[in-house]
Amino acid sequence: MAIETLYGPPSMMSLRDAMNRLVEGSVVQPTEGGEEQRVGMLPVDVYETDDEYIVRASVPGVLPEQVQISVVEGTVSIQAERKEPEVPGQCLLQERSQGTFTRRLTFPTPLNPDAAKAEYEHGVLTLRLPKAEFAKPKQISVTAKTQ
């Protein structure tokens, strides 16, 4: 199964990262607004059963109400924003990313967005995306023809 992914780049990246994203079919999207905003990738795991796709995305430090999910045809978009509170003084080291994170996954079979479910627990978002009825595998029984 091939799943296409599209995600925006961080505001600064290495040449190696840029080439990897180019090869993976990524789209470079400039950040907007006066504030410097980091657009990054949400790490995901994707599983497939006969009936559905299950997507698990790591979104630590984000409240469930800060996550936006949309399904259009076979593409799922997940967007979240992680904001750090302002702290007094000079930052000496900042390794935890913040800003807007977006991930788009395009599935090889149509989805049933009306039956999709999203759960959030301990910084992990779990999406259950049922396949459209006509896209599910069908079992056809074979009967012997008697003469």
Image: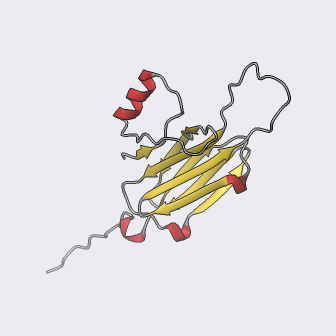
What residue sits 54% from the left and 42% below the top?
44
What residue sits 48% from the left and 41% below the top?
30
Q: Is residue 56 above or below residue 142?
A: above
- Image side of residue 79 versus residue 65, left or right: left
Q: How many marks?
A: 0
Q: Is residue 133 above or below residue 54?
A: below
What residue sits 80% from the left and 22% below the top?
90
Q: Residue furthest left?
A: 147
Q: Is residue 96 above or below residue 35?
A: above
What residue sits 68% from the left and 25% below the top?
95
Quarter of the image where the C terminus is located: bottom left
Q: Residue furthest front?
A: 34
Compare residues 110 and 72 and report the one nearer the observer: 72
- Image side of residue 70 versus residue 83, left or right: left
Let me know if residue 130 appears in the view: no
Q: Residue furthest right?
A: 88
Q: Position of residue 125 (x, y in %)?
A: 64, 49
Colour setup of the view: secondary structure
Compare residues 15 and 55 and report the one nearer the observer: 15
Q: Position of residue 55 (x, y in %)?
A: 54, 50
Compare residues 27 and 118 and report the one nearer the observer: 27
Q: Position of residue 35 (x, y in %)?
A: 64, 40
Q: Specify the quadrant of the image occupied by residue 17.
A: top left
Let me know if residue 133 appears in the view: yes
Q: Is residue 33 above or below residue 138?
A: above
Q: Residue furthest top?
A: 92
- Image side of residue 125 versus residue 147, left or right: right
- Image side of residue 48 versus residue 1, left or right: right
Compare residues 121 and 62 and report the one nearer the observer: 62
Q: Position of residue 33 (x, y in %)?
A: 59, 45
